Amino acid sequence: MGVFKGYRCVLFLLLWRNLILGEIFVHAAVETSEDEELKPPAFKENIYFSPLSLSLSASFPKELEMTDYCLELMHDFGQISASLTSCLVVNARPVKVCQNCYSLYNSLQDIYTNISTGMGPGNESCQESLLHADRVMLLYNLYNSFENIWNTAECINCLSSEHLRSVSNTTLYFIDRLNQSQTCFEKYQQGNHSELCVECRTSYKILNDLYSGMSKNKSLCIDVEDAMNTTRRLWSKDFKCLLKREENVPVIAVSSFMLFLPLIFYLSNYLHSEQKKRKLIHPKRAKSSHSLMNIQDKYS
Amino acid sequence: MANNIAKKVSWSGEGTPLLNGAEERRYSGQPSGGSMFHIGKMSTVDLEEESVTPEEDPMRRRPSEIPHNEKLLSLKYESLDYDNLENQLFLEEERRMSPMSFRCLEICRWIICGLIGVLTGSIAFFIDILVENLAGLKYDVIKEYIDKFTEAGGLSISLILWAVLNSAFVMLGAFIVAFIEPIAAGSGIPQIKCYLNGVKIPRVVRLKTLVVKVWGVIFSVVGGLAVGKEGPMIHSGAVVAAGVSQGRSTSLKKDFKIFEYFRRDTEKRDFVSAGAAAGVSAAFGAPVGGVLFSLEEGASFWNQMLTWRIFFASMISTFTLNNFLSFYKQKPGELSSPGLINFGTFDSEHVQYSLYEFPLFICMGAIGGILGAVFNTLNYWLTIFRIRYVHRRCLQVMEAMLVAAVTATVSFAMIYFSTDCQPLKKGSPEEYPLQLFCADGEYNAMATAFFNTPEKSVRSLFHSPPGTYNPQTLGLFTLTYFLLACWTYGLTVSAGVFIPSLLIGAAWGRLFGILLPIIFSTKNSVWADPGKYALMGAAAQLGGIVRMTLSLTVILVEATGSVTYGLPIMLVLMTAKIVGDYFIEGLYDVHIKLQSVPFLHWEAPATSHWLTAREVMSSPVTCFNRVEKVGTIVDVLSATSTNHNGFPVIMQASSSDEPGKLCGLILRSQLIVLLKHKVFVERVRSRLCRRRLQLKDFRDAYPRFPPIQSIHVSQDERECMMDLTEFMNPTPYTVPEETSLPRVFKLFRALGLRHLVVVDDQNRVMGLVTRKDLARYHLGKHGLEELDLAHP
């Protein structure tokens, strides 16, 4: 029982400390966000890793502890992932994730590569201690979820192929055309939409064709798709610039002509074609008068 | 209806036999009309012509020419010789063979089965690739034009373009079928079914048929008809098997001098059943289903080793196709497309089913049975019309072209007037999304169903997420496709009915699934995905049309790749068969009947025990003596009125009119070979014959024995004698005259007989029972009915 109590004590202490820390965290966040925009705040103080802090790891032997190099990497990872998160959220609607966050994503990738394959001073690797040391595998899972988002968004398609360090020219051109169309829409938005449909058709059509071309080349990412979807919805649903069914008469005429042909065909066949007759054959059978008598014998 | 035939005997078992012992005799006085009489519940025995007085006779003479109908048996169909011919030559050959060579034969059988698998799989691959590419090309061209004309105006031009393209492809397909090989028309399953039943359908397993079949399928599927390429695969597999197992091609006049032992009907038929299985297996990626198909449809002689070999052929076939497709898709070694049609897998959470859905499934089975019966009835009338009036070849080609054009037109009109627009999603199955008047970024939902190859439409109906199709779209699609498919089947193009049936069923099944939550107004998550109802609907519709049971269940289970669905699919198919059979037979059986094929079912008609061999047999029989004059033989063989194929050999009868004692049976084909080699007693004695005839000589002539007209017999030779003892079958099967029809039937069906001699107690030949004598009895609406024999 005494042992149990001792553990409880430690746990309580831990909880209590966490509470205080959380408070500090919040305060710090509020303070820093005022002067430095969107910088991850809490890590600056490095409270979590301070040697003075009361934690379980304090009692572990020296060799199981993390080296400074790894701590630094972890710190960097935390900072960049935090800024990437905020960047993603800010650009979530309308989607501009790929255009605006690719540099952060790239640096996150670099850090992660460093962690997983890089060697620090004295040929030490942080892969084991940072990525797979425990069941939660926090860094690993965090990175995976970022990567997942990035892949779903297919941002690679919109970035230039050289090292993915900038937005590709096609995408830039697309954004340019998109802006032109939007300017046109804004210009004619007031008043009759039919005027808009006529005036903006050329710029919209160029945009639409460009988009179709890009979709064939597989150079679409979520930014482009989302922008195009919105524009298309505006064009078709809001401004109602749809194509009209104007050719009902010729289509019906041709169709009914086609449908009429088989009727004529079958009718003329019925009337004019010679009906196929089959010649019957009289098979040789036993004179079965007596057999018939037998049948009747059986049943009478 | 040609019921006014001479000997029409009807007996419905449940009635009281002949009330008060009074004989009830009725003579049919009309030249036409039924001769079956039912007065009250009394059963009637209708007497035959012979007992009618001469004055009545001319009136009652049946017309010698009648319009084609289903109650006929054609003379052009012969039986296969499945029975092993144990004559002296055979015994000699067996004596000469060492145990080693028997083992070699067994190995050869396995090699042949492997070859069958490989070749069938390759053919499937060839068809698949060509269809995919040609259809892709066609749809791309049409899509481009439709997109262009939607904006610029002139959509009717793209309609005409579509119709013309379709007709052009179908014209090619119909032309080769109609003018080169008419037997390649249709799915080929009825023909293979007949072949496995023991009927020799002329030209059905020739190389020419295979070539025409393969190209015909490609053209008709690319031509946009409501057809599939799966059924013809079975025929193709069968032809491959028949060709490979013979080690030669008579069409190409090339003999590889291998597998000579297998050149007879017994062996060939076993291999054909393996080929059919390999075809099914390549078509659906269902090796077990293929084996069961062969079991269900044919092979009377079924033993464990044969099954195992057939399974081997099936597996090799699906593996070959899979392997080739993986190379084609540039993922070598990734064996993920085992069949021509891939249903995709049903393994997500949404498509589980629960116990209370079983009544719904059974209900769907019933609907499928009824719709299948409607399909078959409509097709039956249409086929009769076609046989009677559209029998000229150019007319047949024209008809096929018209159907193709109308299919395109109807599809276009449906797509044009449809207002069902769905948003284009990433990774959706629409390969050729048509926008037409939909908003940008959306596509016409009707076009996914019509503007696609049928296989892809089926898959889309199974797997598209809920909400992809409007109920109206599905309803209209079901109706039009039902009519189109019904109209298409039986055209002179080679094409199958599996895929259209699946498509119709999937469409109404999905509709059913969509309507369920609306009817019960619940948001039950089990009903959320209409995909599984599409699957059940497809099974029900297919079962309702073709009425296959065991093999179809396994095929569908294998094609969907989920054993979990086995039970519901089985229930659905059972219900569909029971309901459908109440109205009309399966489509294949209807077509077999319309072809006047003497097809033997599993059992004799139920109420036929009172018929004995005496009534069934043909009599008197043309017999030969053991040592017969060549002139007599030639005369009998070349007489046009008798085209018999088997002749009992008798001891010299003491008097001319008394039937002789049976001592053997000889076939026409053997006699022809004997005449060709001039095996006459005189020549043998004078050592004019260089060598004795061997079994090999008979095999070399197989399967195309020359007609008797091509054999020249001089006047001198006519006087020679021929000794048949060595060549005849000395122990033919015989039955006494009193044997009942079901007994005779059982013997025939189980042993695969071609001739059964009826003898009296002194072993004298009284008559001969052949397949046509048995097949003419069938259970009609009014009890036992008899079919007429007719010239082809």
Image: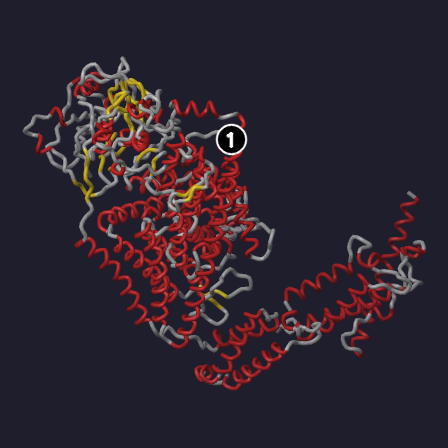
Residue A145 placement (x, y as % from top left): 70, 62
Number of residue marks: 1
Callout 1 crowding tier (Cα within 10 Å): few <14, some 14–19, many ≥20: few
Residue pointed to by mark 1: B305
Quarter of the image where one finds residue B369: top left
Residue lying at 54% horizontally and 82% vertically, measured from the top left: A181
Vertical relation: B72 (above or below) A90? above
Position of the N terminus of chain B, as image quadrant, is: top left
Viewer-side residue, B420 vs B264: B264
Residue A244 in picture, x, y percent from top left = 39, 74
- Quarter of the image for the C terminus of chain B: give it: top left
Q: Is residue B700 above or below residue A221?
A: above
The image position of residue A209, as x and y in percent, is: 51, 76
Tell which residue pokes out farthest to the top in this image. Answer: B762
Using the rendered image of the protein, determine whether residue A185 is visible from the camera's viewpoint: yes
Using the image as rendered, state which of residue A36 and residue B128 is in the foreground. Answer: B128
Residue situated in front as seen by the camera: A187 or B773: B773
**Which residue type does callout 1 highlight?**
Met
Identity of the residue drawn at 93% across and 44% down: A2
Secondary structure state at the residue bearing disc 1: helix
